[in-house]
Image (cartoon, rainbow, N blue to C red):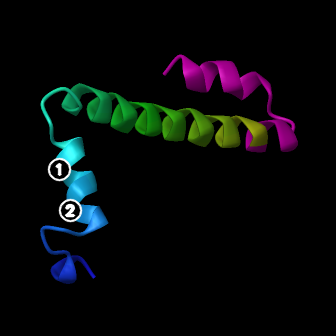
């Protein structure tokens, strides 16, 4: 589908707006936001699994590694 995106398509216009100099820091912040949200949710799931197994004392030691 991207190969069919000519200069007048909505996708081309969207990418043009994203790459404007004023918007590049905002796009970078959005990427960082999604990345760190993913990391936090991954760690939360690991901690929840340790709680389910009854190993709450290992959560603190894992966080300090």
- Observer-nearest of 53 and 19: 19
Element assignment for label 1: helix
Q: Crowding near pointer 1: few (<14 within 10 Å), some, many (20+)?
A: few
Left or right for 39, reference 22: right
Residue 51 location, x and y as percent? 82, 36
**Residue located 35% across and 38% down the image:** 31
Element assignment for label 2: helix
Asked whether the beta carbons under mark 1 and mark 2 sit within 8 Å of each other, the answer is: yes
Residue located beneath label 2 in the image? 12
Residue 29 image-quadrant placement: top left
Is 6 placed above or below 43 here? Answer: below
Q: Which mark is residue 32?
A: none
Quadrant of the image for the N terminus?
A: bottom left
Is 43 placed above or below 49 here? Answer: above
Q: Which mark is residue 16?
A: 1
Q: Crowding near pointer 2: few (<14 within 10 Å), some, many (20+)?
A: some
**Residue located 58% across and 26% down the image:** 62
**Residue located 28% across and 53% down the image:** 14
Residue 6 image-quadrant placement: bottom left
The magenta segment is 49-65
Is residue 39 within the magenta segment?
A: no
Residue 25 location, x and y as percent? 24, 26
**Residue located 66% across and 41% down the image:** 46
Is 28 placed above or below 11 here? Answer: above
Left or right for 50, reference 13: right
How many marks overall? 2
Left or right for 10, reference 54: left
């Amino acid at each position: 589908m991207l190969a069919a995106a000519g200069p007048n398509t909505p996708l081309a216009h969207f990418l043009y707006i994203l790459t404007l100099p004023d918007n590049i820091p905002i796009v970078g912040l959005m990427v960082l936001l999604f990345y760190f949200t993913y990391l936090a949710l991954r760690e939360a799931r690991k901690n929840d699994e340790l709680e389910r197994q009854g190993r709450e004392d290992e959560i603190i030691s894992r966080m300090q590694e």
